[in-house]
Amino acid sequence: YLRARAQQLTATENQPKALADRDALKGDKPAGSGTFAGNWDIVVDSPIGKQSGKGAFKVEGNKITGTQSGSQGSVDVQGKVDGSRAAFSGKAYTPFPITLEFAVTLDGDTFSGTMKTGPFGTFPVTGKRL
């Protein structure tokens, strides 16, 4: 009975809300599709204001490498990609040694997430493909 009843349901008021929401989200380009490879405008929302930078990334399999640059210089980064998520890090030396750790989620031509700056905290970061 339940199987037959489930087959009768259509996108009407009889359909459970979760299924209707799922169907509404379907499209040609699912959220998170795309690649981190390429050139990016990057903005870190730090306690001293928004800090702009650039990113240039390559992706091979599940490995991401590249460079993140800003007003204090550039940092070579490397890490892993898992679907629409990436985690990568690099060591900066100016104005002092510090490891920058990024955890971001891709959504088409944008990404968002966090950048951890060691003992100085974790801050929101966004990126937009150039």
Image (spheres, grey):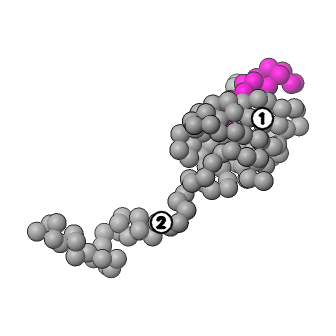
Q: Name the residue rendered at 77%, 35% in the picture.
A: 67
First in sequence: mark 2 or mark 1?
2
Label 2 – label 1 distance at C-alpha? 34 Å
- Seen as rendered, the residue at the extreme bottom is 12
Residue at label 1?
67
Q: Can residue 109 be seen in this view?
A: yes
Residues 83 and 48: in front is 83
* Magenta stretch encompasses residue 124: no
Q: Which residue is drawn at 57% across and 54% down?
A: 33
Q: Is residue 84 above or below residue 21?
A: above
Residue drawn at x 36%, y 64% as measured from the top left: 18
Q: Quadrant of residue 102?
A: top right
Give residue 98's position: percent from left, percent from top.
76, 23
User: Is 106 located above or below residue 77 in the figure?
Assistant: below
Residue beneath label 2, please? Answer: 25
Q: Position of residue 2 (x, y in %)?
A: 15, 66
Instruction: Give the camera-side residue of 120 and 32.
Output: 32
Can you tell which quarter of the image residue 73 is in?
A: top right
Q: Is 30 left, or right, of 39 in this rendering?
A: left
Look at the image and give the residue range highlighted in magenta: 88-102
What amino acid type should be assigned to the residue bearing mark 1? Thr
Q: Main secondary structure of the magenta part?
A: strand
* Number of dots carrying numbers: 2
